[in-house]
Image (tube, rainbow, N blue to C red):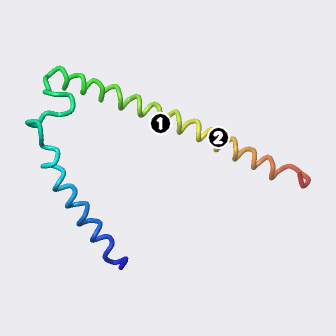
């Protein structure tokens, strides 16, 4: 039973992907925002240009804070291990 599960999942995913194209091909190929022109493409490019550096900066800040917490936890554990007594 479990040996057939990956193959069944792959076949089901492939069938869904094959059926998605014709299901979404309506309205003459227009997207949700209507007819696409050069201005929309340019603005979408600007959004991407702004998004990726902002995303990288945000993830770097999150990682920096997590590293800072990890270092503080390690330092506290080291101090606790070096202190005499049971408390």
Residue density around tag 1, few if under 14, some if 14–19, many if 20 or more, within 10 Å: few
* Residue under the image location 65 percent in, 42 percent down: 71
Asked if residue 38 is positioned above or below residue 52 in the image, the reply reads above
The picture places residue 70, in percent across and down from the top left corner, at 64, 44
Q: Which residue is mark 1?
A: 59
User: Which labelled disc corresponds to residue 69?
Assistant: 2
Position in image of residue 8 (x %, y %):
28, 70
- Of all residues shown, which one is farthest toward the right? 85
Disc 2 secondary structure class: helix
Q: Is residue 38 above or below residue 67?
A: above
Q: Position of residue 76 (x, y in %)?
A: 75, 45
Q: Is residue 74 above or below residue 55?
A: below
Q: Are marks 2 and 1 in contact (CB under 8 Å)?
A: no
Q: Quadrant of residue 39?
A: top left
- Residue 33 - label: none
Residue located at (69% from left, 47% from top): 74
Of the image marks 2 and 1, the number of the one nearer the N terminus: 1
Q: Is 71 in front, or is 17?
A: 17
Q: Residue drawn 81% across and 49% down?
A: 80
Q: CA distance from mark 2 to mark 1?
A: 15 Å
Q: Position of residue 15 (x, y in %)?
A: 20, 61
Q: Secondary structure at mark 1?
A: helix
Q: In the rendered view, tell whether residue 77 sits above or below residue 45.
A: below
């Amino acid at each position: 039973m479990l040996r057939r599960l990956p193959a069944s999942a792959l076949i089901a995913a492939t069938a869904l992907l094959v059926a998605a194209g014709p299901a979404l091909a309506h309205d003459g190929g227009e997207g949700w925002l209507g007819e696409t022109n050069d201005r929309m493409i340019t603005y979408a490019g600007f959004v991407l240009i702004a998004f990726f550096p902002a995303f990288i900066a945000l993830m770097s800040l999150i990682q920096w804070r997590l590293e800072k917490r990890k270092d503080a936890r390690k330092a506290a554990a080291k101090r606790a291990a070096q202190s005499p007594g049971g408390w």
